[in-house]
Image (cartoon, rainbow, N blue to C red):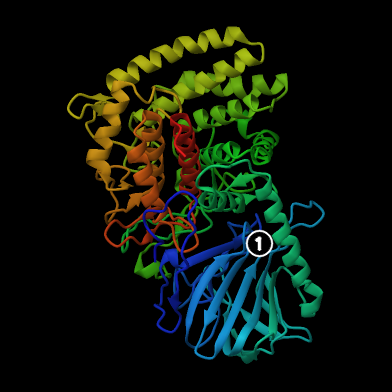
Amino acid sequence: MQGQEGATPGSSRSPTAFDVEKVPSYIPIGGHGVIGNMRSCALVAYDGTIDWCCLPRFDSFPIFSSILDSRLGGFWKMAPPSGRSIQRYRENTNVLETTFETDSGRAAVLDFMPYTPDPLWPNPPEVHRVLRCERGRVKFRTSIVPRFIFGRRAAKITSTENGFLIASRKRRAVLSSSLPLYIVGGEALKGEVEMTGGEEHTFVLSYGESIPRAISEYGTMYKLTATERSWKAWVEGLVYRGRWKEAVIRSALVLRLLVYSPTGAIVAAPTTSLPEAPGGNRNWDYRFSWIRDSAFSLWALGQLGSQAEAERYFVWLLTTGKLFAHRLQPVYGVDGDHHFEERELTYLDGYRHSKPVRVGNAAAHQVQLDAYGVILDALYFTLRHGGGFPEDTYHRSVKALAYIVCQDWRKPGHGVWEIRSGTHHYVYTKVWCYVALDRASRIARMTGHPQDAVEWEKTMKEMKEEILAKGWSEKKKALAMSYGSDELDAANLLLPLVRFLDPKDPKMVSTVDAIIRELGQDDLVFRYRIEDGFKGEEGAFLACSFWLVSCLAKMGRLGDAMDIFGKLQGRANHLGLYSEEIDPKTGEALGNFPQAYTHMGLISAACDLDRALDLEGTV
Protein backbone atom coordinates (compact mmCIF):
# COMPACT_ATOMS: atom_id res chain seq x y z
CA MET A 1 0.00 0.00 0.00
CA GLN A 2 2.95 2.31 0.54
CA GLY A 3 4.92 4.10 -2.15
CA GLN A 4 8.48 3.45 -3.25
CA GLU A 5 11.19 3.70 -0.60
CA GLY A 6 14.36 5.72 -0.91
CA ALA A 7 12.84 8.55 -2.95
CA THR A 8 15.44 10.87 -4.41
CA PRO A 9 15.20 14.63 -4.93
CA GLY A 10 12.82 15.49 -7.74
CA SER A 11 11.67 11.90 -8.30
CA SER A 12 8.10 11.14 -9.33
CA ARG A 13 6.05 8.53 -7.53
CA SER A 14 5.48 5.32 -9.49
CA PRO A 15 1.77 4.55 -9.92
CA THR A 16 0.39 1.73 -7.80
CA ALA A 17 -2.22 -0.60 -9.31
CA PHE A 18 -4.91 -2.20 -7.13
CA ASP A 19 -7.16 -5.17 -7.70
CA VAL A 20 -10.78 -3.97 -7.51
CA GLU A 21 -12.34 -7.45 -7.53
CA LYS A 22 -10.88 -8.74 -4.25
CA VAL A 23 -11.52 -5.78 -2.00
CA PRO A 24 -11.55 -6.21 1.82
CA SER A 25 -14.52 -5.01 3.85
CA TYR A 26 -12.28 -2.27 5.27
CA ILE A 27 -9.92 -0.82 2.71
CA PRO A 28 -6.62 0.18 4.36
CA ILE A 29 -6.47 3.75 5.59
CA GLY A 30 -3.67 4.45 3.16
CA GLY A 31 -5.79 3.14 0.27
CA HIS A 32 -7.61 6.45 -0.02
CA GLY A 33 -7.39 9.80 -1.67
CA VAL A 34 -9.05 12.92 -0.31
CA ILE A 35 -11.11 15.60 -2.04
CA GLY A 36 -12.55 18.74 -0.49
CA ASN A 37 -13.44 22.39 -0.84
CA MET A 38 -12.05 24.04 2.34
CA ARG A 39 -15.34 23.39 4.11
CA SER A 40 -15.55 19.62 4.16
CA CYS A 41 -13.81 16.54 2.78
CA ALA A 42 -14.49 13.08 1.41
CA LEU A 43 -12.25 10.01 1.28
CA VAL A 44 -12.26 8.08 -2.00
CA ALA A 45 -10.84 4.55 -1.89
CA TYR A 46 -8.85 2.98 -4.71
CA ASP A 47 -11.90 0.92 -5.74
CA GLY A 48 -14.00 4.03 -6.39
CA THR A 49 -15.82 3.97 -3.03
CA ILE A 50 -16.51 7.12 -1.06
CA ASP A 51 -16.56 5.65 2.44
CA TRP A 52 -16.26 8.89 4.41
CA CYS A 53 -17.93 12.21 3.69
CA CYS A 54 -19.16 14.90 6.09
CA LEU A 55 -21.45 17.61 4.77
CA PRO A 56 -21.68 20.55 4.89
CA ARG A 57 -18.68 20.95 7.28
CA PHE A 58 -15.68 18.96 8.46
CA ASP A 59 -17.35 18.40 11.82
CA SER A 60 -20.86 17.66 10.49
CA PHE A 61 -22.49 14.26 10.76
CA PRO A 62 -21.26 12.10 7.86
CA ILE A 63 -23.54 10.99 5.08
CA PHE A 64 -21.08 8.16 4.25
CA SER A 65 -19.09 6.53 7.06
CA SER A 66 -18.56 2.87 6.13
CA ILE A 67 -14.87 3.32 6.98
CA LEU A 68 -16.08 3.18 10.61
CA ASP A 69 -18.70 0.47 10.16
CA SER A 70 -18.93 -1.50 6.91
CA ARG A 71 -22.50 -2.57 7.70
CA LEU A 72 -24.10 0.61 9.06
CA GLY A 73 -21.93 3.44 7.78
CA GLY A 74 -23.13 4.03 4.24
CA PHE A 75 -21.04 4.45 1.07
CA TRP A 76 -21.02 5.40 -2.59
CA LYS A 77 -19.24 2.88 -4.81
CA MET A 78 -18.57 3.32 -8.51
CA ALA A 79 -16.44 0.66 -10.19
CA PRO A 80 -16.39 -2.16 -12.77
CA PRO A 81 -16.98 -5.73 -11.50
CA SER A 82 -13.31 -6.58 -12.04
CA GLY A 83 -10.05 -5.07 -13.18
CA ARG A 84 -7.30 -2.94 -11.70
CA SER A 85 -7.25 0.71 -10.68
CA ILE A 86 -4.71 3.50 -10.49
CA GLN A 87 -5.36 6.77 -8.65
CA ARG A 88 -3.70 10.10 -9.28
CA TYR A 89 -4.33 13.76 -8.64
CA ARG A 90 -4.58 16.11 -11.56
CA GLU A 91 -1.40 18.16 -11.47
CA ASN A 92 -1.25 20.72 -8.65
CA THR A 93 -4.91 20.23 -7.68
CA ASN A 94 -7.09 18.31 -5.25
CA VAL A 95 -9.08 16.82 -8.12
CA LEU A 96 -8.79 13.01 -7.95
CA GLU A 97 -8.89 10.61 -10.88
CA THR A 98 -9.31 6.85 -10.47
CA THR A 99 -8.61 4.93 -13.69
CA PHE A 100 -9.87 1.37 -14.12
CA GLU A 101 -8.29 -1.08 -16.55
CA THR A 102 -10.37 -4.13 -17.50
CA ASP A 103 -9.95 -6.89 -20.07
CA SER A 104 -12.26 -5.01 -22.43
CA GLY A 105 -11.31 -1.37 -21.94
CA ARG A 106 -10.40 1.55 -19.73
CA ALA A 107 -12.57 4.06 -17.88
CA ALA A 108 -12.01 6.71 -15.22
CA VAL A 109 -13.93 8.33 -12.38
CA LEU A 110 -13.13 11.97 -11.72
CA ASP A 111 -13.98 13.13 -8.19
CA PHE A 112 -13.98 16.68 -6.85
CA MET A 113 -15.78 19.15 -4.62
CA PRO A 114 -16.22 22.60 -6.19
CA TYR A 115 -13.68 25.12 -4.91
CA THR A 116 -12.80 28.70 -5.75
CA PRO A 117 -11.49 31.59 -3.62
CA ASP A 118 -14.12 33.88 -5.11
CA PRO A 119 -16.15 35.15 -2.10
CA LEU A 120 -19.27 35.40 -4.25
CA TRP A 121 -19.20 31.66 -4.96
CA PRO A 122 -19.44 29.92 -1.58
CA ASN A 123 -17.90 26.50 -2.38
CA PRO A 124 -21.20 24.60 -2.29
CA PRO A 125 -21.50 21.33 -0.32
CA GLU A 126 -21.46 19.17 -3.42
CA VAL A 127 -19.63 16.03 -4.53
CA HIS A 128 -19.25 15.72 -8.30
CA ARG A 129 -18.35 12.43 -9.96
CA VAL A 130 -17.69 12.17 -13.68
CA LEU A 131 -17.57 8.68 -15.19
CA ARG A 132 -15.85 8.52 -18.57
CA CYS A 133 -15.02 5.55 -20.82
CA GLU A 134 -11.64 6.22 -22.42
CA ARG A 135 -11.13 3.08 -24.49
CA GLY A 136 -12.98 -0.06 -25.51
CA ARG A 137 -16.06 -1.18 -23.60
CA VAL A 138 -16.41 -1.15 -19.80
CA LYS A 139 -19.29 -2.23 -17.56
CA PHE A 140 -19.77 -0.04 -14.48
CA ARG A 141 -21.92 -0.46 -11.40
CA THR A 142 -22.77 2.18 -8.84
CA SER A 143 -24.27 1.69 -5.40
CA ILE A 144 -25.26 4.68 -3.25
CA VAL A 145 -26.23 3.94 0.35
CA PRO A 146 -26.53 7.22 2.29
CA ARG A 147 -26.95 7.08 6.07
CA PHE A 148 -27.16 10.02 8.42
CA ILE A 149 -25.83 10.60 11.97
CA PHE A 150 -22.99 8.08 11.77
CA GLY A 151 -25.23 5.37 10.39
CA ARG A 152 -27.86 5.76 13.08
CA ARG A 153 -30.54 6.68 10.56
CA ALA A 154 -31.09 5.21 7.14
CA ALA A 155 -32.05 7.83 4.59
CA LYS A 156 -35.45 7.77 2.98
CA ILE A 157 -34.99 8.09 -0.76
CA THR A 158 -37.76 9.31 -3.03
CA SER A 159 -37.75 9.84 -6.77
CA THR A 160 -38.45 13.23 -8.34
CA GLU A 161 -38.54 14.54 -11.88
CA ASN A 162 -34.84 15.46 -11.95
CA GLY A 163 -33.32 13.03 -9.49
CA PHE A 164 -33.69 11.83 -5.92
CA LEU A 165 -34.43 13.38 -2.57
CA ILE A 166 -32.42 11.88 0.32
CA ALA A 167 -33.93 12.82 3.68
CA SER A 168 -33.88 11.95 7.36
CA ARG A 169 -35.77 14.26 9.71
CA LYS A 170 -33.83 17.53 9.71
CA ARG A 171 -31.22 16.51 7.12
CA ARG A 172 -31.66 16.65 3.40
CA ALA A 173 -29.55 15.99 0.34
CA VAL A 174 -30.33 15.44 -3.31
CA LEU A 175 -28.73 13.37 -6.01
CA SER A 176 -28.91 14.06 -9.71
CA SER A 177 -27.45 11.84 -12.41
CA SER A 178 -27.27 11.49 -16.17
CA LEU A 179 -27.37 7.71 -15.65
CA PRO A 180 -30.77 6.20 -14.79
CA LEU A 181 -30.77 4.91 -11.21
CA TYR A 182 -33.33 2.87 -9.32
CA ILE A 183 -34.28 2.80 -5.64
CA VAL A 184 -33.68 -0.37 -3.61
CA GLY A 185 -35.75 -0.84 -0.45
CA GLY A 186 -36.32 2.90 -0.13
CA GLU A 187 -32.79 3.32 1.32
CA ALA A 188 -30.31 2.83 -1.54
CA LEU A 189 -29.73 3.69 -5.18
CA LYS A 190 -28.22 1.43 -7.79
CA GLY A 191 -27.30 1.70 -11.43
CA GLU A 192 -25.46 -0.20 -14.11
CA VAL A 193 -24.16 0.77 -17.52
CA GLU A 194 -21.93 -0.62 -20.25
CA MET A 195 -20.01 2.25 -21.79
CA THR A 196 -17.97 2.56 -24.97
CA GLY A 197 -15.07 4.88 -25.72
CA GLY A 198 -16.05 8.53 -25.39
CA GLU A 199 -19.24 7.97 -23.38
CA GLU A 200 -19.63 9.95 -20.17
CA HIS A 201 -22.01 10.19 -17.21
CA THR A 202 -22.17 12.80 -14.46
CA PHE A 203 -23.38 12.48 -10.86
CA VAL A 204 -23.87 15.23 -8.26
CA LEU A 205 -24.66 14.82 -4.57
CA SER A 206 -25.73 18.14 -3.10
CA TYR A 207 -26.39 18.69 0.61
CA GLY A 208 -29.10 21.02 1.86
CA GLU A 209 -31.28 21.22 -1.24
CA SER A 210 -34.92 20.21 -1.03
CA ILE A 211 -35.48 19.44 -4.70
CA PRO A 212 -32.85 18.12 -7.12
CA ARG A 213 -32.07 20.10 -10.24
CA ALA A 214 -31.54 18.64 -13.66
CA ILE A 215 -27.98 17.35 -13.87
CA SER A 216 -27.06 19.98 -16.46
CA GLU A 217 -28.00 22.78 -14.04
CA TYR A 218 -25.18 21.87 -11.66
CA GLY A 219 -22.59 22.95 -14.24
CA THR A 220 -20.18 20.14 -13.45
CA MET A 221 -17.71 20.83 -16.24
CA TYR A 222 -17.69 24.56 -15.58
CA LYS A 223 -17.11 23.94 -11.87
CA LEU A 224 -14.39 21.42 -12.65
CA THR A 225 -12.54 23.96 -14.77
CA ALA A 226 -12.92 26.66 -12.12
CA THR A 227 -11.83 24.27 -9.36
CA GLU A 228 -8.70 23.13 -11.21
CA ARG A 229 -7.82 26.71 -12.10
CA SER A 230 -8.22 27.82 -8.47
CA TRP A 231 -5.98 25.10 -7.01
CA LYS A 232 -3.32 25.67 -9.66
CA ALA A 233 -3.35 29.42 -9.15
CA TRP A 234 -2.75 28.96 -5.43
CA VAL A 235 0.15 26.57 -6.07
CA GLU A 236 1.71 29.05 -8.52
CA GLY A 237 1.88 31.57 -5.67
CA LEU A 238 4.11 29.32 -3.57
CA VAL A 239 7.82 30.10 -3.54
CA TYR A 240 9.32 26.66 -2.91
CA ARG A 241 11.99 25.87 -5.50
CA GLY A 242 13.80 23.15 -3.58
CA ARG A 243 14.70 19.56 -4.27
CA TRP A 244 11.46 17.91 -3.17
CA LYS A 245 8.90 19.98 -5.05
CA GLU A 246 6.43 17.17 -5.75
CA ALA A 247 6.16 16.07 -2.11
CA VAL A 248 6.14 19.61 -0.75
CA ILE A 249 3.43 20.81 -3.14
CA ARG A 250 1.21 17.83 -2.35
CA SER A 251 1.66 18.44 1.38
CA ALA A 252 0.84 22.12 0.91
CA LEU A 253 -2.33 21.18 -0.99
CA VAL A 254 -3.33 18.89 1.88
CA LEU A 255 -2.84 21.67 4.44
CA ARG A 256 -4.80 24.10 2.27
CA LEU A 257 -7.58 21.53 1.94
CA LEU A 258 -7.86 21.28 5.73
CA VAL A 259 -8.46 25.02 6.19
CA TYR A 260 -12.08 25.88 6.99
CA SER A 261 -12.42 28.87 4.67
CA PRO A 262 -15.17 30.81 6.51
CA THR A 263 -12.95 31.26 9.60
CA GLY A 264 -9.41 30.25 8.66
CA ALA A 265 -9.34 27.50 11.30
CA ILE A 266 -7.39 24.37 10.33
CA VAL A 267 -8.60 20.91 11.27
CA ALA A 268 -6.03 18.38 12.46
CA ALA A 269 -7.53 15.79 10.08
CA PRO A 270 -10.89 15.36 8.34
CA THR A 271 -11.72 12.04 10.06
CA THR A 272 -12.53 10.62 13.46
CA SER A 273 -11.60 7.40 15.25
CA LEU A 274 -9.25 5.85 12.71
CA PRO A 275 -7.15 3.86 15.17
CA GLU A 276 -3.57 4.57 16.21
CA ALA A 277 -3.36 0.90 17.23
CA PRO A 278 -5.32 -1.83 15.39
CA GLY A 279 -7.89 -3.30 17.75
CA GLY A 280 -7.03 -0.75 20.44
CA ASN A 281 -8.93 2.19 21.86
CA ARG A 282 -6.63 5.04 20.80
CA ASN A 283 -9.33 6.45 18.57
CA TRP A 284 -9.92 10.21 18.55
CA ASP A 285 -11.95 12.83 16.73
CA TYR A 286 -9.59 15.18 14.89
CA ARG A 287 -12.18 17.26 13.01
CA PHE A 288 -11.43 20.31 15.15
CA SER A 289 -8.90 23.11 15.20
CA TRP A 290 -6.02 22.72 17.64
CA ILE A 291 -4.16 25.97 18.19
CA ARG A 292 -0.91 24.01 18.07
CA ASP A 293 -1.65 22.16 14.84
CA SER A 294 -3.02 25.26 13.15
CA ALA A 295 -0.04 27.41 14.09
CA PHE A 296 2.43 24.74 12.95
CA SER A 297 0.58 24.34 9.66
CA LEU A 298 0.63 28.10 9.13
CA TRP A 299 4.33 28.07 9.95
CA ALA A 300 4.88 25.47 7.21
CA LEU A 301 2.77 27.35 4.64
CA GLY A 302 4.54 30.57 5.60
CA GLN A 303 7.87 28.99 4.67
CA LEU A 304 6.39 28.45 1.21
CA GLY A 305 5.39 32.10 0.93
CA SER A 306 1.69 31.67 1.61
CA GLN A 307 0.82 34.25 4.30
CA ALA A 308 -2.89 34.65 3.56
CA GLU A 309 -3.85 31.64 5.70
CA ALA A 310 -2.01 33.02 8.73
CA GLU A 311 -3.60 36.44 8.37
CA ARG A 312 -7.06 34.93 8.06
CA TYR A 313 -6.52 32.68 11.07
CA PHE A 314 -5.37 35.51 13.31
CA VAL A 315 -8.22 37.72 12.18
CA TRP A 316 -10.56 34.91 13.24
CA LEU A 317 -8.83 34.48 16.60
CA LEU A 318 -8.96 38.21 17.24
CA THR A 319 -12.48 38.93 16.03
CA THR A 320 -13.94 36.00 17.96
CA GLY A 321 -12.07 37.09 21.09
CA LYS A 322 -10.05 33.88 21.44
CA LEU A 323 -6.84 35.83 22.06
CA PHE A 324 -8.58 38.11 24.53
CA ALA A 325 -9.72 35.24 26.75
CA HIS A 326 -8.23 34.79 30.20
CA ARG A 327 -7.27 31.23 29.31
CA LEU A 328 -6.74 29.68 25.88
CA GLN A 329 -8.51 26.45 25.12
CA PRO A 330 -6.15 24.07 23.26
CA VAL A 331 -8.80 23.13 20.70
CA TYR A 332 -11.89 24.79 19.22
CA GLY A 333 -14.57 23.94 16.72
CA VAL A 334 -14.00 25.24 13.20
CA ASP A 335 -16.48 28.05 13.88
CA GLY A 336 -14.91 28.90 17.25
CA ASP A 337 -17.26 26.75 19.30
CA HIS A 338 -15.74 25.71 22.62
CA HIS A 339 -18.70 23.77 24.02
CA PHE A 340 -18.35 20.30 22.53
CA GLU A 341 -18.21 17.14 24.57
CA GLU A 342 -16.58 13.82 23.81
CA ARG A 343 -18.87 10.80 23.60
CA GLU A 344 -18.71 7.25 22.31
CA LEU A 345 -20.95 5.80 19.60
CA THR A 346 -21.16 2.29 21.01
CA TYR A 347 -23.35 0.89 18.23
CA LEU A 348 -20.62 1.32 15.60
CA ASP A 349 -18.09 -1.45 14.98
CA GLY A 350 -15.15 0.87 14.33
CA TYR A 351 -12.53 0.61 11.61
CA ARG A 352 -11.49 -3.07 11.50
CA HIS A 353 -13.35 -3.62 14.78
CA SER A 354 -11.34 -0.97 16.63
CA LYS A 355 -13.74 0.49 19.15
CA PRO A 356 -14.80 2.97 20.33
CA VAL A 357 -15.86 5.47 17.71
CA ARG A 358 -15.64 8.87 19.38
CA VAL A 359 -17.30 12.17 18.52
CA GLY A 360 -15.97 15.35 20.13
CA ASN A 361 -12.68 15.60 21.98
CA ALA A 362 -12.11 16.02 25.71
CA ALA A 363 -8.71 17.57 25.02
CA ALA A 364 -10.59 20.85 24.77
CA HIS A 365 -10.72 20.89 28.56
CA GLN A 366 -7.08 20.01 29.21
CA VAL A 367 -4.30 22.28 30.42
CA GLN A 368 -1.89 22.70 27.50
CA LEU A 369 0.26 25.75 28.12
CA ASP A 370 2.26 25.24 24.91
CA ALA A 371 -0.69 26.82 23.08
CA TYR A 372 0.46 30.24 24.30
CA GLY A 373 3.91 29.71 22.89
CA VAL A 374 2.81 28.53 19.48
CA ILE A 375 0.37 31.43 19.11
CA LEU A 376 2.97 34.05 20.07
CA ASP A 377 5.53 32.35 17.85
CA ALA A 378 3.10 32.50 14.94
CA LEU A 379 2.28 36.15 15.68
CA TYR A 380 5.98 36.99 15.72
CA PHE A 381 6.54 35.10 12.45
CA THR A 382 3.69 37.05 10.83
CA LEU A 383 4.96 40.38 12.11
CA ARG A 384 8.53 39.66 11.02
CA HIS A 385 7.37 38.81 7.50
CA GLY A 386 5.48 42.00 6.88
CA GLY A 387 2.34 41.63 8.96
CA GLY A 388 1.36 43.74 11.92
CA PHE A 389 -1.39 44.58 14.37
CA PRO A 390 -2.74 47.70 16.08
CA GLU A 391 -1.49 49.02 19.41
CA ASP A 392 -4.64 47.85 21.13
CA THR A 393 -4.07 44.31 19.92
CA TYR A 394 -0.58 44.30 21.41
CA HIS A 395 -2.02 45.00 24.84
CA ARG A 396 -5.08 42.74 24.49
CA SER A 397 -3.31 39.74 22.97
CA VAL A 398 0.51 39.75 23.14
CA LYS A 399 0.84 41.36 26.55
CA ALA A 400 -2.19 39.54 27.95
CA LEU A 401 -0.94 36.12 26.80
CA ALA A 402 2.56 36.80 28.13
CA TYR A 403 1.06 37.78 31.47
CA ILE A 404 -0.78 34.45 31.71
CA VAL A 405 2.40 32.53 30.88
CA CYS A 406 4.26 34.37 33.64
CA GLN A 407 1.49 33.41 36.05
CA ASP A 408 1.07 29.77 34.99
CA TRP A 409 4.34 28.41 33.64
CA ARG A 410 5.16 26.54 36.86
CA LYS A 411 1.86 24.62 36.74
CA PRO A 412 1.70 21.00 35.48
CA GLY A 413 -0.30 20.13 32.38
CA HIS A 414 -1.32 17.34 30.04
CA GLY A 415 1.38 17.98 27.46
CA VAL A 416 1.51 17.85 23.69
CA TRP A 417 0.45 14.20 23.58
CA GLU A 418 -2.64 14.90 25.72
CA ILE A 419 -2.00 12.00 28.08
CA ARG A 420 -5.10 11.52 30.21
CA SER A 421 -3.61 9.74 33.21
CA GLY A 422 -2.70 12.98 34.99
CA THR A 423 -0.75 16.20 34.74
CA HIS A 424 3.04 16.55 34.84
CA HIS A 425 5.77 19.14 34.39
CA TYR A 426 6.54 18.29 30.77
CA VAL A 427 9.81 19.66 29.41
CA TYR A 428 8.23 20.33 26.01
CA THR A 429 5.53 22.48 27.62
CA LYS A 430 8.00 24.44 29.72
CA VAL A 431 10.08 25.14 26.62
CA TRP A 432 7.05 26.55 24.83
CA CYS A 433 6.38 28.80 27.81
CA TYR A 434 9.93 30.07 27.36
CA VAL A 435 9.25 30.52 23.62
CA ALA A 436 6.07 32.44 24.44
CA LEU A 437 8.01 35.05 26.42
CA ASP A 438 10.87 35.11 23.91
CA ARG A 439 8.50 35.90 21.04
CA ALA A 440 6.51 38.36 23.16
CA SER A 441 9.78 40.13 24.02
CA ARG A 442 10.77 40.34 20.38
CA ILE A 443 7.36 41.69 19.42
CA ALA A 444 7.55 44.20 22.28
CA ARG A 445 10.87 45.57 21.03
CA MET A 446 9.66 45.68 17.42
CA THR A 447 6.53 47.61 18.41
CA GLY A 448 8.10 50.07 20.83
CA HIS A 449 7.50 48.41 24.22
CA PRO A 450 11.05 47.57 25.41
CA GLN A 451 10.09 47.89 29.09
CA ASP A 452 7.84 44.83 28.77
CA ALA A 453 10.63 42.87 27.10
CA VAL A 454 13.02 43.56 30.00
CA GLU A 455 10.61 42.03 32.51
CA TRP A 456 9.82 38.99 30.41
CA GLU A 457 13.48 38.31 29.69
CA LYS A 458 14.14 38.04 33.43
CA THR A 459 11.51 35.31 33.68
CA MET A 460 12.93 33.60 30.58
CA LYS A 461 16.33 33.31 32.24
CA GLU A 462 14.74 31.68 35.28
CA MET A 463 12.74 29.32 33.06
CA LYS A 464 15.74 28.14 31.08
CA GLU A 465 17.83 27.47 34.17
CA GLU A 466 15.01 25.41 35.69
CA ILE A 467 14.30 23.43 32.50
CA LEU A 468 17.94 22.48 31.98
CA ALA A 469 18.31 21.52 35.65
CA LYS A 470 15.06 19.72 36.44
CA GLY A 471 14.43 18.40 32.93
CA TRP A 472 17.82 16.77 32.46
CA SER A 473 18.16 13.02 32.93
CA GLU A 474 21.68 12.20 33.97
CA LYS A 475 20.93 8.51 33.45
CA LYS A 476 19.93 9.00 29.80
CA LYS A 477 22.19 12.00 29.17
CA ALA A 478 19.20 13.71 27.62
CA LEU A 479 16.38 16.13 28.27
CA ALA A 480 13.58 13.94 29.58
CA MET A 481 9.85 13.89 29.07
CA SER A 482 9.14 15.56 32.42
CA TYR A 483 10.87 16.86 35.51
CA GLY A 484 12.49 14.10 37.56
CA SER A 485 11.88 11.47 34.89
CA ASP A 486 14.23 9.30 32.86
CA GLU A 487 11.65 8.71 30.13
CA LEU A 488 12.31 10.25 26.71
CA ASP A 489 9.94 12.32 24.59
CA ALA A 490 10.29 12.76 20.81
CA ALA A 491 8.59 16.15 21.12
CA ASN A 492 11.91 17.44 22.46
CA LEU A 493 13.22 17.21 18.90
CA LEU A 494 11.48 20.55 18.42
CA LEU A 495 13.73 22.33 20.93
CA PRO A 496 16.38 23.44 18.42
CA LEU A 497 13.72 24.14 15.80
CA VAL A 498 12.12 26.76 18.07
CA ARG A 499 15.58 28.07 19.06
CA PHE A 500 15.49 27.08 22.70
CA LEU A 501 18.87 25.42 22.28
CA ASP A 502 21.41 25.60 19.50
CA PRO A 503 21.21 22.38 17.45
CA LYS A 504 24.91 21.76 18.12
CA ASP A 505 24.65 22.38 21.85
CA PRO A 506 26.10 19.29 23.60
CA LYS A 507 22.88 18.76 25.59
CA MET A 508 20.83 18.87 22.39
CA VAL A 509 23.16 16.56 20.49
CA SER A 510 23.06 14.08 23.35
CA THR A 511 19.25 14.32 23.53
CA VAL A 512 18.87 13.66 19.80
CA ASP A 513 21.18 10.67 19.99
CA ALA A 514 19.25 9.27 22.95
CA ILE A 515 15.93 9.67 21.11
CA ILE A 516 17.33 7.88 18.06
CA ARG A 517 18.67 5.11 20.27
CA GLU A 518 15.55 4.54 22.41
CA LEU A 519 12.62 5.83 20.35
CA GLY A 520 13.94 5.31 16.83
CA GLN A 521 13.48 2.37 14.49
CA ASP A 522 15.31 3.02 11.22
CA ASP A 523 13.51 6.05 9.73
CA LEU A 524 10.61 5.84 12.22
CA VAL A 525 10.32 7.51 15.62
CA PHE A 526 7.92 6.68 18.44
CA ARG A 527 6.55 9.50 20.58
CA TYR A 528 7.43 7.82 23.89
CA ARG A 529 7.64 4.40 25.54
CA ILE A 530 5.67 5.08 28.72
CA GLU A 531 2.48 3.31 29.78
CA ASP A 532 -0.27 5.79 28.94
CA GLY A 533 -3.36 3.86 30.03
CA PHE A 534 -4.64 2.83 26.59
CA LYS A 535 -4.84 -0.55 24.89
CA GLY A 536 -2.50 -1.68 22.18
CA GLU A 537 0.88 -0.50 21.00
CA GLU A 538 0.59 2.64 18.95
CA GLY A 539 2.48 3.11 15.72
CA ALA A 540 5.43 5.36 15.00
CA PHE A 541 4.48 9.04 14.89
CA LEU A 542 5.45 10.38 11.47
CA ALA A 543 5.76 14.06 12.40
CA CYS A 544 8.49 13.10 14.88
CA SER A 545 10.50 11.50 12.08
CA PHE A 546 10.32 14.71 10.06
CA TRP A 547 11.36 16.72 13.14
CA LEU A 548 14.37 14.41 13.41
CA VAL A 549 15.29 15.21 9.80
CA SER A 550 15.19 18.93 10.60
CA CYS A 551 17.35 18.41 13.70
CA LEU A 552 19.95 16.38 11.84
CA ALA A 553 20.04 18.92 9.02
CA LYS A 554 20.65 21.78 11.46
CA MET A 555 23.31 19.71 13.25
CA GLY A 556 25.16 19.19 9.96
CA ARG A 557 24.51 15.44 9.83
CA LEU A 558 23.27 15.70 6.25
CA GLY A 559 23.90 12.09 5.23
CA ASP A 560 21.68 10.78 8.02
CA ALA A 561 19.05 13.44 7.32
CA MET A 562 18.95 12.63 3.60
CA ASP A 563 18.72 8.90 4.27
CA ILE A 564 15.80 9.25 6.68
CA PHE A 565 13.99 11.80 4.53
CA GLY A 566 14.25 9.58 1.47
CA LYS A 567 12.82 6.61 3.34
CA LEU A 568 10.01 8.73 4.79
CA GLN A 569 8.87 9.67 1.31
CA GLY A 570 8.36 5.96 0.76
CA ARG A 571 5.99 6.00 3.77
CA ALA A 572 3.42 8.09 1.90
CA ASN A 573 0.54 6.31 0.22
CA HIS A 574 0.17 5.94 -3.53
CA LEU A 575 -0.96 9.59 -3.79
CA GLY A 576 1.69 11.13 -1.58
CA LEU A 577 -0.64 11.41 1.43
CA TYR A 578 0.36 10.68 5.04
CA SER A 579 -1.58 9.50 8.05
CA GLU A 580 -0.72 10.28 11.65
CA GLU A 581 1.24 7.09 12.33
CA ILE A 582 2.76 4.05 10.65
CA ASP A 583 2.61 0.45 11.83
CA PRO A 584 6.34 -0.42 11.96
CA LYS A 585 5.60 -4.13 11.40
CA THR A 586 3.38 -3.86 8.33
CA GLY A 587 4.08 -0.35 7.02
CA GLU A 588 0.34 0.40 7.00
CA ALA A 589 -1.04 3.84 7.75
CA LEU A 590 -2.59 4.32 11.20
CA GLY A 591 -4.60 7.11 12.76
CA ASN A 592 -6.68 9.87 11.24
CA PHE A 593 -6.03 10.62 7.61
CA PRO A 594 -4.66 12.71 6.02
CA GLN A 595 -2.91 14.32 8.98
CA ALA A 596 -1.98 18.02 8.98
CA TYR A 597 0.79 17.53 11.55
CA THR A 598 2.62 15.04 9.32
CA HIS A 599 2.40 17.14 6.17
CA MET A 600 3.51 20.20 8.13
CA GLY A 601 6.53 18.23 9.31
CA LEU A 602 7.42 17.18 5.76
CA ILE A 603 7.36 20.77 4.48
CA SER A 604 9.51 22.06 7.33
CA ALA A 605 11.97 19.16 7.00
CA ALA A 606 12.31 19.72 3.25
CA CYS A 607 12.96 23.44 3.74
CA ASP A 608 15.48 22.83 6.54
CA LEU A 609 17.28 20.16 4.54
CA ASP A 610 17.34 22.34 1.42
CA ARG A 611 18.92 25.21 3.37
CA ALA A 612 21.54 22.95 4.91
CA LEU A 613 22.45 21.41 1.55
CA ASP A 614 22.63 24.84 -0.08
CA LEU A 615 25.02 26.07 2.62
CA GLU A 616 27.21 23.03 2.01
CA GLY A 617 27.05 23.58 -1.73
CA THR A 618 25.40 20.24 -2.45
CA VAL A 619 23.32 20.04 -5.63
Name the residue: 36% across, 40% down: 561
Name the residue: 56% across, 87% down: 105
The image quarter in which residue 179 lies: bottom right
Check disc 1 and give the amino acid type. Answer: Pro
Q: Is residue 43 visible?
A: no
Viewer-proximal residue, 517 or 562?
Answer: 562
Residue 293 in picture, x, y percent from top left: 51, 42
The image quarter in which residue 429 lies: top left
Residue 502 versus residue 352 in the image, above or below:
above
How many residues crowd around disc 1 within 10 Å: few (fewer than 14), some, or many (20 or more)? Answer: some
Viewer-proximal residue, 402 or 132?
Answer: 132
Name the residue furthest left.
Answer: 475
Viewer-proximal residue, 266 or 349?
Answer: 266
Q: Quadrant of the N terminus?
A: bottom left
Which residue is identified by label 1?
A: 56
Residue 153 versus residue 583 in the image, above or below:
below
Residue 529 in picture, x, y percent from top left: 25, 43
The image quarter in which residue 168 lies: bottom right
Q: Is residue 342 visible?
A: yes
Viewer-proximal residue, 497 or 469?
Answer: 497
Residue 142 in picture, x, y percent from top left: 58, 84
Residue 539 versus residue 437 in the image, above or below:
below
